[in-house]
Amino acid sequence: MEAYDEFIQRVQDIHRLGALQGHLGWDQEVLMPSKGAQSRGEMMAWLAGQRHQQLTDERMGSLLLALETHELDNDQRANVREMRRMYDQAVKLPKSFVENFAQARSEALVAWQEARAASDFEAFKPTLERLIALTREKIERLGVVTTPYDVLLDEYEVGMTVSDYDPLFAGMKERLVPLLQAITEAQQRTPEPSMPADLRFPVEAQKAFCKAVSTNMGFDFEAGRMDASTHPFSAGLWPGDTRFTTRFDEQDPFSCLYAVMHETGHALYEQGLDHHHRYTPRGGAVSLGVHESQSRFWENQIGRTAAFWKVALPWFTKAFPDAPTWDEASLNRLANRVEKGFIRVEADEVTYNLHVMIRYEIEKRLFNEGLEVDHIPAIWNSMFKEWFDIDVPEDRLGCLQDIHWSMGAFGYFPTYTLGNLYAAQLLEAMAESLGDVTELVASGNWEPLLSWLRPRIHERGSQVTPAQLIEEATGSPPSPEPFLRYVEEKYGALYGLS
Amino acid sequence: MEAYDEFIQRVQDIHRLGALQGHLGWDQEVLMPSKGAQSRGEMMAWLAGQRHQQLTDERMGSLLLALETHELDNDQRANVREMRRMYDQAVKLPKSFVENFAQARSEALVAWQEARAASDFEAFKPTLERLIALTREKIERLGVVTTPYDVLLDEYEVGMTVSDYDPLFAGMKERLVPLLQAITEAQQRTPEPSMPADLRFPVEAQKAFCKAVSTNMGFDFEAGRMDASTHPFSAGLWPGDTRFTTRFDEQDPFSCLYAVMHETGHALYEQGLDHHHRYTPRGGAVSLGVHESQSRFWENQIGRTAAFWKVALPWFTKAFPDAPTWDEASLNRLANRVEKGFIRVEADEVTYNLHVMIRYEIEKRLFNEGLEVDHIPAIWNSMFKEWFDIDVPEDRLGCLQDIHWSMGAFGYFPTYTLGNLYAAQLLEAMAESLGDVTELVASGNWEPLLSWLRPRIHERGSQVTPAQLIEEATGSPPSPEPFLRYVEEKYGALYGLS
């Protein structure tokens, strides 16, 4: 197997360059002094260039061709399959195009930040138009098989197309919009409890509390770190060193807690990968959707429950002795407020997917129906009005809120919804294996939960496609049904909807 | 100049890999979780391998050959000269030898740590013998021109040989040993002042105090960071991002302060390099000796003076309100205690170079006279007895104290002494340009000091050899005389020797 050995060495070199990008990216968000920005950008671009060069090396092409007719085991086949995808994509996009796109993105990021601050969509329009034109060019270069938007969707979640997403979102709209309506009516009858306005939760105490939760979830702090950054994120880095970040709001400990549970979910996936296959596709996480399922599972299915609060209550009371004497039910109630908010990243479980759907519908029309950028705000606002029954007062709170489009990341949003659906499917399947999950969570010993996920999700890496992985782990193909059942039951009970 | 353009692009790639090693090295000492060690070692080895491969690429050899007959400007010539040195060295050492050496070093590090902890030289002996054998092999492979030890000395400070170092150390021994003797007698007449044993200096207050000092020295905290690590160090990294570390001892604020002044001295050099030449030899620091001159200059020539304490006293009082009401003279006295200690890294200005000299003498005999490892402890202890007039009670406090030999770094120690000598030369030259430096320091505006160093040392990078640089900056070739004058005057006054 000389060809495979040479191939895998090249694959590892490419992934090591990617891991270095990940490390510098982590440092950039957490530690980098402000004047380091220019050199950092230059170094990141250099690493990207080295990576592209090694990926598109002719030798990689001929090794792939040779190996595709070899006898290979499952893991080897997965590596060849994934590298073929990466290689084809990379060789189809000429260096000049990639550089143009990168340049447009850096400019767009600045333009978007200014436009959002001023809530001025017109100011962002020309930049967005350029990015969309470049993305349309990218689609053409990569080659359309089904619909143009599918090319983008596939980039972020292999194998997913409009014909997969459409029925999924339609079903959700049908049931989430009435659920939201019913909750709103219930809220008018009985006002929501809320956090006392003058209460303060010191940062050091939040840190201790959240570390206790993360540790109980199974995060190994000898093989990772928790730090602070403006936007929480998780960086897999490499074996023995996985890092996540959180943020601290002294008036709201839930902001930090659920960021930590979310990011720990991502980080447990990374810590649980099969390091024997490190620096190869086989050894890496399979997709954004599956990654998000891990974060959402711990954040919502576990973290936003009374069973969780039964366990966390003594830690909470110890960390915040000045807080009112809440019991697990009131903490759980506070952690599960449903709100018709404008902002996706602050959304609860009921509204979150509706937020995603607006973006999905607009992206679909942009790339499959030639929608013009001009019309984005009106469409956004009318969909928001239809589903949330409130008016978007300014684009800052509407179509200018997300960073993704300014990064040229079209087709990314729907993976958030996949994460929510997969998490609910995993919870149902876990209950079939382990019995009453609520009881397990309430027992405080969460090890069986992690041990269930390890061989079914984490250790498998990219052995199979995301949809196959979910089907093999849960016994059913991806479906919105478990999520809808979960959310209807949970919020039905919380808001007495019956 | 197509050949030069191609050459410099390759040079920058090689240096970028080195800069990444630097970044990971910083992270390793400051942040890395313990279980990340194995992956980190692997990643560092991979980067070293990539760097070696690019450096020894045949194309680099032919470009160097071509460029050595081209018309070049001074900066270009410096890059070709330095890359020729690196290239010749790299191609003379086969990959298998380099890997063997790296392997022996990792094993030696562990063996040394255990041997030092147990103060057991016999346990370290076989490892040290192997490293010395490998180093002798390295010398042969690189090729002896003058003496074998010169090959090693040149690696750490280009152009320096035994015939340069010998007279320099002989002169120092002649004057430092009697000075130490006179100080010891003075100490017997008047006991040294010391720190009250129960006084505590909180870490946060030390941080604030030291940052104030570092800022006043001119360190730009928007283009760098100060963190904590077991052994203080400085990492140039890249333009706009230079980092140094310190340590905190709650019983002794001087430990942190002088570590910060020392490392800030190194870091100012890095911040002051000409970034137009980034990722090339021309744009990098010229040598270890010159680097050390920058750290020692600020730590000793500036930091350990009454003029410094005049400026720092209000910061000190503000940071440590519980300290006795010391004046600048008593703080200066506390900061300048001379002690016959066993440990080099804790040594004062009078004894430091004697510590270095012991190591230099032993290394010289090892490589030029075939000294056997067996005899190291006896020689060490007898030299120590001769110069310090005290007996080394155990090898932990003698020949096992330093990490350098376990890292195969033979020939490194003398650069510390060069740093001390250059710093004293720079102080004299600076006084000729700027007038009374003591007055300048006492004024609190240290900007003229840094501005004097910038064009003469920092911005010049590796334009010329270290000795040339010092000669052009100070008007005289490297010499021990200014240092000896400085130390005799300073400690003569402090201990009333006259």
Image (cartoon, coloured by chain):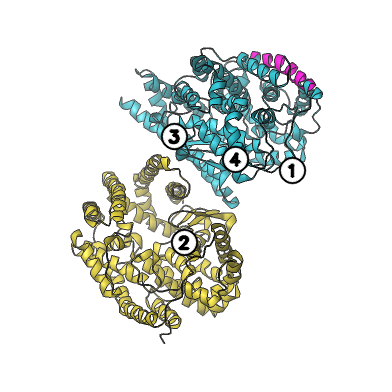
Chain colours: A yellow, B cyan
- Can residue B269 be seen at all in this image of the molecule? yes
Which quadrant holds residue B337?
top right
Q: Residues within 10 Å of mark 4 (few under 14, many from 20)?
A: some
Q: Type of residue at label 2?
A: Gly
Q: Nearer the viewer, mark 2 or mark 1?
A: 1
Is A316 a magenta residue? no
B433 or A435: nearer the eye? B433
Q: Is residue B238 left or right of residue B492?
A: left
Circle 4 residue: B318
Q: Which residue is mark 2?
A: A461
Q: Which residues are magenta?
A: B167-185
- Residue B67 vs B345, above or below: the answer is above
Picture coordinates of residue A191 (x, y %)? Answer: 42, 78
Residue tagged 1: B198
The mark that comes first in sequence, 4 or 1, is 1
- Please give the chain letter of the residue carrying mark 2: A
Task: Say whether mark 1 and mark 4 are on the same chain.
Answer: yes
